[in-house]
């Protein structure tokens, strides 16, 4: 049997609740976006229920330490279709065994979650390191990103603490939502982009008049500080993969 859910974390947790309530035997979990009906396979559509989801999450908090709760959440943020079923099976496995079951790396679901979480954490750190803001004419620092995984929920505190004295927006162009810091709180937002704005860099007319000067000065500094004789392209790419160069002002050399 296949359980179908809406792709949300509460939906996934509700699916676990439904499995324990129904005990249908072997079940796989798929999101409604990836599910394809099969002629000889039964399916059950999970209706997300916040009360049921909260009970399952509270149960996980009693079973898992904080580091594994974070791994669980990071694995969900990976958005990898196979991760949903691993999360589902992992949760059932944890509830059916004594505390510490998550440390059994002989279990396929434990290994999968650890792998997904590691990839998401790596993407989080790279976003924190490579994001560059541009100062817009209305005084807000903006950047558009398209990370491999949904890491915005993980980088919010980093940028709130680091740039506490300025308003900023980090917008995920792939997932069409962003974070806006208004000098006190971080809120999730969506933007109806006008023509020319839905890009990683705002159009020049939207930027603060000094932004272009700052960009030129930074590029000049980078070029002057770069020692050609000590250039090691392989090492550089290992630490700064090419897919992140689009965020770096110094890589947009004229």
Image (spheres, rainbow, N blue to C red):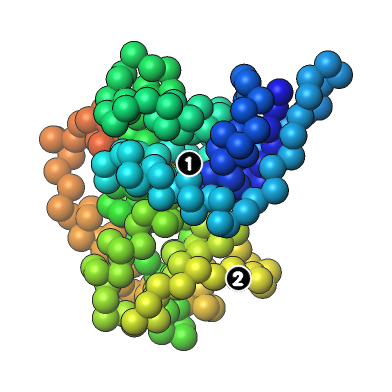
Tell me which residue sits at (30%, 54%) in the image: 128
| Classed neighbour count for the residue bearing mark 2: other residues with Cα under 10 Å, few (<14), some (14–19), many (≥20) | few
Image point (27%, 72%), residue name: 163
> Is residue 185 or residue 110 the one in the foreground?
110
Circle 1 sits in a helix, a strand or a loop, which is it? helix
Q: In the figure, 208 relative to 9: above or below? A: below
Q: Identify the residue at horizontal 50%, vertical 64% (top origin).
A: 178
Give the Cα separation between the discs numbered 1 and 2.
Answer: 24 Å
Label 2 sits on a secondary structure element that is loop
Residue 9's x, y, as percent?
53, 48
What residue is disc 2 on?
Answer: 191
x, y (%) of residue 203? 54, 70
Total numbered labels placed on residues in the image? 2
Instruction: Tell me whether circle 1 and circle 2 mark residues in contact (CB < 8 Å).
Output: no
Q: Position of residue 133 (x, y in %)?
A: 37, 66
Residue 48's spot in the image, x, y percent?
65, 51
**Which quarter of the rendering shows the N terminus?**
top right
Which residue is labeled 1 in the image? 76
User: What mark, if any, has residue 231 been given in the picture?
Assistant: none
Measuring 26% from the left and 41% from the top, which residue is drawn there? 65
* In front of the other: 234 or 151: 151
Query: Is 137 placed above or below 44 here?
Result: below
In which quarter of the view is residue 141 placed? bottom left
77 to the left or right of 130: right
Quarter the C terminus occupies: bottom left
Classify residue 160 as left or right of residue 143: left
Up/down of 134 relative to 69, above or below: below
- Whether residue 188 is visible to the viewer of this picture, yes or no, is yes
Residue closer to the observer: 75 or 192: 75
In this picture, is 171 found above or below 67? below
């Amino acid at each position: 049997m296949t359980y179908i859910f809406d792709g949300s974390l509460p939906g996934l947790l509700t699916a676990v609740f439904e499995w324990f309530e129904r005990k249908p035997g072997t079940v796989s979990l798929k999101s409604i976006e990836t599910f394809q009906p099969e002629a000889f396979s039964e399916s059950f559509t999970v209706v997300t229920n916040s009360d049921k989801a909260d009970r399952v999450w509270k149960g996980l908090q009693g079973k898992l330490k904080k580091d594994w709760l974070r791994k669980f959440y990071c694995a969900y943020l990976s958005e990898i279709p196979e991760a949903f079923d691993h999360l589902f099976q992992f949760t059932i496995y944890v509830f059916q065994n004594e505390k510490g079951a998550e440390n059994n790396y002989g279990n396929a679901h434990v290994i999968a979650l650890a792998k997904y979480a590691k990839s998401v954490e790596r993407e989080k750190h790279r976003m924190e390191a490579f994001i560059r803001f541009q100062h817009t004419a209305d005084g807000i620092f903006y950047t558009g990103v398209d990370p491999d995984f949904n890491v915005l929920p993980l980088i919010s505190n980093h940028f709130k603490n680091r740039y506490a004295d300025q308003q900023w927006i980090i917008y995920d162009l792939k997932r069409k939502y962003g974070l806006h810091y208004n000098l006190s709180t971080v809120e999730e937002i969506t933007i109806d982009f006008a023509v020319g704005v839905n890009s990683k860099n705002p159009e020049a007319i939207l930027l603060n008049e000094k932004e272009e000067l700052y960009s030129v000065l930074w590029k000049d500094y980078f070029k002057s500080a770069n020692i050609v004789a000590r250039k090691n392209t392989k090492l550089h790419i290992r630490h700064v993969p090419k897919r992140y160069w689009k965020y770096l002002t110094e890589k947009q050399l004229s």
